[in-house]
Image (spheres, helix red, strand yellow):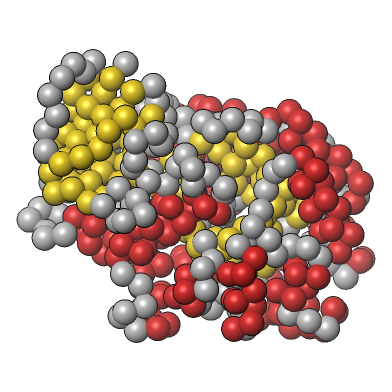
Amino acid sequence: MRTVLENAAIATVDAEGTEYRRGHVVIEGGRVLRVGEGRIDGEADRRIDCDGCLITPGLVNTHHHLYQWATRGLAADSTLFEWLVALYPVWGRLDAEITHSAASAGLARLALTGCTTVADHHYVFPADGGDPIEALVAAAHRIGVRAHLVRGSMDRGESAGGLPPDHLVEDTEAALLGTEAAIDAHHDPAPDARIRIAVGPCSPFSVSAALMTSSAELARRKGVRLHTHLAETRDEEAQCRAEFGCTPAEYADKLGWLADDVWLAHTVHLAPAAIRRLGATGTGAAHCPTSNGRLGSGIAPVRDLLDAGVPVGLGVDGAASNESGGLGEELHQALLQARQRGGPSSLTVRQALWMGTMGGARCLGRDAELGSVEPGKLADLAVWDLTGLAYAGIEDPVAALVLGAVPPLRLLLVGGETVVAGGALATADESTLSGELAAASRRLR
Ligand SMILES: [Zn+2]
């Protein structure tokens, strides 16, 4: 099966930043065969005219909590800690069916905003709630996107000085066993994997040091990646200093958590030495600008992180702290926040696109097969339709994507397979997904 996309502007996001004004992409066997300027003759099973469109790599979401699609709009004006304390009891009623409905809807929304690979961090495992990881795997297959499912954990409830209520945390050993079982059941190391598993104790204020170090040992024994929340708020830093006598970044370093098989969510509050240390160790950062803004957490030092060589990707974070839940918007938000912090030269529109694609692929250890439009790479592509009122005539298509409203998708492909066509989801019925989501949200109230 050979597909040719033609007559499109193309931003390949390769190492040279190659772009074409009016080019083509040839896809075969789920991979990109050729990309270049002009038309291409020869046999094709399918030719798609992409006149007026911009083709980019599919966006990579590096941090999410899909179950939160069923708990949006709560604690709307709170800080992170206030918000968590309000939401923990609601999350305590989660089960696999609710997680499946929320994840299906959340993944559909991500696909409709250009996202082809999603890292989800699931850390709530109520005792009689079934298997949420299995529910997330099923939702990823249903919508047709790639998923990096982070089996999260919390073992430090209130009685142990943690933030979550005791009934919401697992025993340390049970968390490790559950994580190993998820890896054994679902992790696919193949280059074209649709599902991978990572290990993700939740945060310094909900996880013991023992679970952090044992999780790192487990992940390295199994050859999977590590993920956690770090340095998100000043409250977290104050608690870390009071308890451990160091910053969250120093704490993570002591526990073996700054390394090139780790990516960290947020990294908002980092001293210059910590930024250098992330760069020297190759530790990735999942920048979540909308969520940081919603919770008033601060503005991550993205320019400094990039200058230090840190692989920075973008994340929407859970929809309970980012009710929009779209990844296309994060390109825009990341650019605005970087410039508010460091002036107009602190991030270009193309650097924002790089973070949303190749930067994310690097965070997830997938830069050899994802993140750019190049021969041999997986055909995960977003074809943005710039023909409408909001974009027509604009000089630079990449500026249209990053600075303007998120364009509709003429097409979204994952491994060459159609997930979105003509601005609508092709793999599931949107109104069915919305109905399931509304029912799941009602059940949690
Ligand atoms: Zn998060």
- 255 and 154: which is toward the camera: 255
Q: Please determine whether, in this image, residue 88 is positioned above or below residue 75.
A: above
Decide which of 292, 373 is in the foreground and name it.
373
Instruction: Tell me: 359 left or right of 199.
Output: left
Q: Residue visible at 92% across and 66% down?
A: 159
Residue at 34 percent across and 40 percent down: it is 374
Residue 272 on image: x %, y %: 59, 83
Q: Position of residue 360 (x, y in %)?
A: 49, 53
Q: Residue at the location (26% across, 52% down)?
A: 18
Q: Residue at x 31, y 79 (%)?
A: 345
The x and y percentages for residue 300 are: 52, 74
Residue 222 location, quadrant: top right
Residue 421, relative to residue 215: is it above or below? above
Question: Of residues 310 and 441, which is closer to you in this image?
Answer: 310
- Residue 98 vs 301, above or below: the answer is above
Percent coordinates x, y for residue 33 in the rendering: 31, 30
